Image: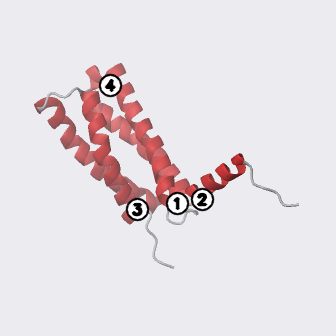
Amino acid sequence: MEQTATGSDRRSGLAARLLEDERVRFVIVGGFNTVLGYALFVTFELLVGRYIGYLVSLYASYAISTVVAFVLHRRFTYRVRGSASLALDFVRFSSVYLVSLGINTIALPLLVELAHVPVIVAQAVIVVVTTLVSYFGHKLFSFRRPAA
């Protein structure tokens, strides 16, 4: 007697196949971390932004989200194991985020001060650009390993 797969079996099989794709894993982790970083920025802005300024809110949110992103991308997205290259991976990973942070540091004041875009809206716009920068930077630099 032949058994047929149930709907949930097919869905879990599809989910497993999707999770084999590094790009899908990047989108999941990157999406989570983007939401986290933006939520931290908004929280800092709403709670203490008028005292510390939007750039300090930006730097604080980047500091926290960079560490979270490193752990999740290293473990889940790129599936790097072992501690042999941990420090080097973190330096490389952080350097990609520093490029994004540099873009953000220039773009945010331009949008806020010159274009008069509200700071929280301006940051939302910038997140789109920095997400693309980080994907390619991490893919091609942060966790790149020599071909086997």
Which colour style is shown? secondary structure
Q: Amino acid at mark 1?
A: Asp
The answer to whether mark 4 and mark 2 are in CB contact below 8 A is no
Query: Closer to the N terminus: mark 3 or mark 4?
Result: 4
Q: Which mark is residue 139?
A: 3
Residue visible at 45% across and 75% down in the picture: 146
Q: Which mark is residue 45?
A: 4
Residue visible at 27% across and 41% down in the picture: 126
- 21 is higher (above) or lower (below) than 129: below
33 or 11, nearer to the observer:
11
The location of residue 137, given as percent across then percent down, is: 35, 59
Residue visible at 66% across and 55% down in the picture: 13
* Pointer 2 residue: 17
- 49 is higher (above) or lower (below) than 103: above
Question: For numbered disc 4, what is the local secondary structure?
Answer: helix
Q: Which quadrant of the rendered structure holds the N terminus?
A: bottom right
Query: Closer to the N terminus: mark 4 or mark 2?
Result: 2
Q: Amino acid at mark 4?
A: Glu
82 vs 144, left or right, is: right
The answer to whether mark 1 and mark 3 are in CB contact below 8 A is no
